[in-house]
Image (tube, helix red, strand yellow):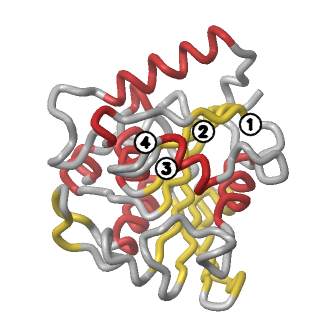
């Protein structure tokens, strides 16, 4: 079976994040085993406020191996999603070939992509292209769409972060369509494969996980759709 690891944001917890994302709802996620790990002190590796001495990359590898030992996991379909600090940690994982290479695709939402752990000089993905799906609100007061100084370090603008992944993924052309009022979906063609990099920009949306009660688009089904379309070669 496919495996989805879902990382909560800083200060959050697995139970609350499960309630927000609803990946345990079979109508949204019909077939993925979903695991909601808890970060030490409610945060994940990467920002300056992260717990010193904790390697969440090693933890993730150990976690995935433990799940594989106990469940029938399709090793070509291990996925990661997360919110805020948890989404930023996905960027750290994706840039780490040893630990991120076990994942088929990533779906960070409202990601805190601090440049000291996600910059080009420190980013060495296990393979190229590496499927990536990011969603961000233009009115996010916590992780600004335009970048700048964040609570845990310097943040790139989301367009700049996307351009880095477009280069890493050998993307050439892109196409943008509106999928709801004020919701713009951009898909890149990467290494001659369409849709391996995708970004949903939600005009006026804040830092919360976009769902049916706070956004024109419910992101959780989009996450499952994108991840399900990608396998590790």
At label 4, counting other C-alpha atoms closer than 10 Å, the crowd grade (few under 14, some 14-19, many 20 or more) is many
Q: In the rendered structure, are the residues bearing label 3 and label 4 in contact, judged by CB atoms less than 8 Å apart?
A: no
Quadrant where the N terminus sits is top right
Looking at the image, can residue 211 be seen? yes
Q: In the rendered structure, are the residues bearing label 2 and label 1 in contact, judged by CB atoms less than 8 Å apart?
A: yes
132 or 120: nearer the viewer: 132
Residue 85 drawn above or below residue 53: below
Mark 4 vs mark 2: which is more N-terminal? 2
Q: Position of residue 93 (x, y in %)?
A: 40, 38
Marks 4/2: CA distance? 11 Å
Mark 4 vs mark 1: which is more N-terminal? 1
The secondary structure type at the circle numbered 1 is loop
Q: Relative to 163, is 108 on the left or the right?
A: right
Marks 3/4: CA distance? 13 Å
User: Which numbered circle lies on residue 109?
Assistant: none
77 or 209: nearer the viewer: 209
Mark 2 vs mark 1: which is more N-terminal? 1
Residue that badge 2 annotates = 79
Residue that badge 1 annotates = 32
Nearer to us: label 4 or label 1 = 1
Residue that badge 4 annotates = 94
Residue that badge 3 annotates = 82
Marks 1/3: CA distance? 15 Å
Task: Residue at the far bottom: name it.
Answer: 181
């Amino acid at each position: 079976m496919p495996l989805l690891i879902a990382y909560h944001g800083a200060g959050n917890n697995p139970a609350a994040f499960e309630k927000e994302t609803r990946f345990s709802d079979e109508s949204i996620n019909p077939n993925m085993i979903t695991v909601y790990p808890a970060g030490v002190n409610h945060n994940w590796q990467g920002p300056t406020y992260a717990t010193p001495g904790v390697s969440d990359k090693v933890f993730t590898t150990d976690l995935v191996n433990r799940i594989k030992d106990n469940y029938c996991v399709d090793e070509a379909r291990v996925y990661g999603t997360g919110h805020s600090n948890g989404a930023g940690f996905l960027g750290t994982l994706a840039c780490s070939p040893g630990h991120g290479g076990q994942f088929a695709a990533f779906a960070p939402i409202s990601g805190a992509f601090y440049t000291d752990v996600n910059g080009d000089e420190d980013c060495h993905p296990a393979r190229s292209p590496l499927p990536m799906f990011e969603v961000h609100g233009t009115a996010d007061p916590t992780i600004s769409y335009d970048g700048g100084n964040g609570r845990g370090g310097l943040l790139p603008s989301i367009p700049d972060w996307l351009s880095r992944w477009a280069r890493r993924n050998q993307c050439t052309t892109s196409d943008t369509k509106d999928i709801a009022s004020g919701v713009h979906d951009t898909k890149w063609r990467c290494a001659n494969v369409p849709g391996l990099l995708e970004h949903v920009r939600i005009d006026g949306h804040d830092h919360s996980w976009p769902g049916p009660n706070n956004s024109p688009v419910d992101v959780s089904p989009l996450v499952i759709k994108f991840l399900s379309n990608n396998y590790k070669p």
